[in-house]
Image: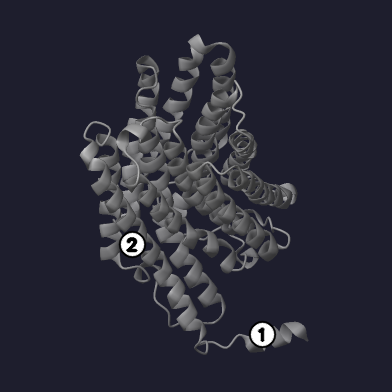
């Protein structure tokens, strides 16, 4: 593992990212229960209430929580961008996002306007608190690396999708669906997946693949051009989608080809690793490359089928690509955080990063997730597959929660013991 260029002394308190990471699988469990209580014909309609609820239980409850947790941890370390009052800011945003999302699910499901109102206020406060705090922290960044640029572009898109989401929820709360509602919803979903999630993953990959997997570095063209070219493609898609719909396909091909190129590059990077040791996180990266390739091309061809397969595209890219990579990174980031913080406190007799998570359970969790995602796709043609796939997904999320909780329990148990190397002498010298 390469730690070159990391300002480890700037790392935030471990509780700040962990609360986001540990909550994400629980929303995954909730999403699985909601799928279990629904039916495939309803979920096939991307604008049905059940489909919206399940989608946001995953996109906000899992994607956003994991991404904000990663940004909280990585920005201070990679760029020295320290978030002011990080404990208070992250705790406030965490509770606003949590209660806002729960209120949204209850409000939309039961058609309770009061809950939906609480939802757009809570989610708005949570999103904008995190986004603006991170952007403010980045104001003094001196070295805008490829990873930082990817994060910055992702945050820009997150600001717009959060604003659009609040608008959409406001219309549900006031029961006044305007003529622009579904146009905004379409932009909201595309920018969320490709702009917010996709660009962040690409930016993080520039740093993570060489650091955690000792893979070859990305070429300068990838680092300097890909994020901006995808961003331009998303803006062009917006313009064509709204004003020149007959040419929309051009922009979709532009975006899809760059993501397919990224998927191919990731696959090749793993083939050229200096230490080609395989574990479940490698499986997740490789699987995500396959899902992203399939999803990108299906997104293009869906244009010729009147968006008949758009939900399937969402499963392939949202579940197969985004969720797979994020879970794979949780298996790396959480043990690393525990090891790093304990090591910094003077604890030497601790498990290694690779020993903190049961490899067998991680493989079972991976297998169940992939089976459930494939099952969800075929459930549109064989409805009987929906229920067992939802059960597999729920079990997979419960195993994920257990797996990432294990290193945290190691952290708590170790903290009760005296450090192998007492750091108090150094802290006393610092005070003198």
Left or right, 432 with respect to 363, comes to right
Q: Is residue 316 above or below residue 270?
A: above
Q: Position of residue 297 (x, y in %)?
A: 36, 25
Q: Secondary structure at mark 1?
A: helix
Mark linked to residue 399 = 2
Q: Residue at x 54, y 21 (%)?
A: 237
**Residue 2: % across, % down:** 47, 59
Q: Residue 94's image quarter?
A: bottom right
Mark 1 surroundings within 10 Å by alpha-carbon count, few (fewer than 14), some (14 through 19), many (20 or more): few
Q: Secondary structure at mark 2?
A: helix
Q: Is residue 114 visible?
A: yes
| x and y, in percent, of residue 323 in the image | 41, 47
Mark number for residue 426?
1
Residue positioned 45% across, 46% down in the render: 58
State the residue in front, 66 or 136.
66
> In which image quadrant can residue 405 be found?
bottom left
- Callout 2: few (<14), some (14-19), or many (20+) C-alpha neighbours within 10 Å? some
When the figure is inspected, residue 223 is found, relative to residue 341, above or below; the finding is above
Q: Nearer the viewer, residue 310 or 355?
A: 310
Question: Which labelled disc corresponds to residue 192?
Answer: none
Horizontal arrangement in the rendering, residue 285 relative to residue 416 (left or right): left
Quadrant where the N terminus sits is: bottom left
């Amino acid at each position: 593992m390469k730690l070159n260029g990391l300002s480890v002394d700037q790392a935030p308190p471990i509780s700040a990212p962990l609360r986001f990471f540990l909550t994400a699988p629980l929303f995954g469990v909730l999403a699985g229960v909601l799928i279990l209580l629904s039916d495939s014909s309803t979920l096939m309609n991307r604008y049905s209430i059940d489909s919206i609820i399940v989608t946001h239980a995953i996109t906000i409850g899992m994607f956003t929580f994991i991404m904000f947790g990663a940004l909280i941890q990585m920005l201070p370390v990679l760029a020295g961008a320290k978030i002011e009052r990080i404990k208070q800011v992250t705790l406030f945003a965490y509770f606003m996002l949590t209660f806002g999302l729960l209120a949204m699910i209850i409000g939309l499901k039961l058609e309770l306007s009061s809950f939906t109102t609480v939802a757009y206020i809570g989610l708005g406060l949570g999103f904008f608190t995190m986004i603006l705090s991170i952007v403010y922290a980045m104001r003094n960044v001196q070295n805008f690396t490829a990873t930082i640029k990817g994060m910055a572009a992702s945050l820009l898109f997150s600001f717009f999708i959060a604003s659009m989401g609040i608008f959409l929820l406001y219309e549900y709360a006031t029961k006044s669906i305007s003529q622009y509602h579904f146009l905004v919803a379409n932009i909201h979903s595309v920018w969320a997946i490709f702009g917010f999630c996709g660009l962040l993953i690409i930016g993080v990959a520039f740093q993570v693949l060489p650091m955690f997997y000792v893979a070859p570095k990305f070429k300068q063209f990838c680092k300097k051009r890909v994020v901006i070219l995808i961003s331009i493609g998303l803006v062009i898609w917006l313009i064509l989608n709204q004003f020149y719909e007959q040419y929309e396909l051009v922009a979709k091909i532009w975006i899809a080809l760059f993501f397919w190129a990224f998927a191919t590059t990731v696959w090749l990077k793993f083939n050229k690793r200096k230490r080609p040791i395989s574990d479940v996180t490698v499986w997740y990266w490789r699987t995500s490359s396959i899902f992203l390739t399939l999803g990108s091309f299906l997104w293009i061809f869906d244009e010729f089928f009147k968006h008949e397969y758009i939900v399937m595209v969402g499963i392939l890219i949202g579940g197969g690509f985004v969720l797979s990579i994020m879970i794979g990174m949780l298996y790396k980031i959480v043990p690393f955080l525990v090891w790093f913080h304990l090591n910094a406190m003077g604890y030497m007799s601790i498990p290694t990063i690779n020993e903190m998570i049961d490899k067998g359970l991680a493989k079972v969790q991976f297998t169940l997730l992939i089976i459930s995602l494939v099952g969800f796709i075929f459930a549109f043609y064989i409805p009987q597959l929906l229920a067992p796939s939802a059960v597999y997904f729920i079990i997979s999320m419960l195993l994920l929660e257990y797996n990432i909780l294990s290193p945290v329990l190691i952290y708590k148990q170790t903290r009760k013991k005296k450090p192998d190397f007492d750091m108090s002498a150094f802290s006393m010298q610092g005070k003198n």
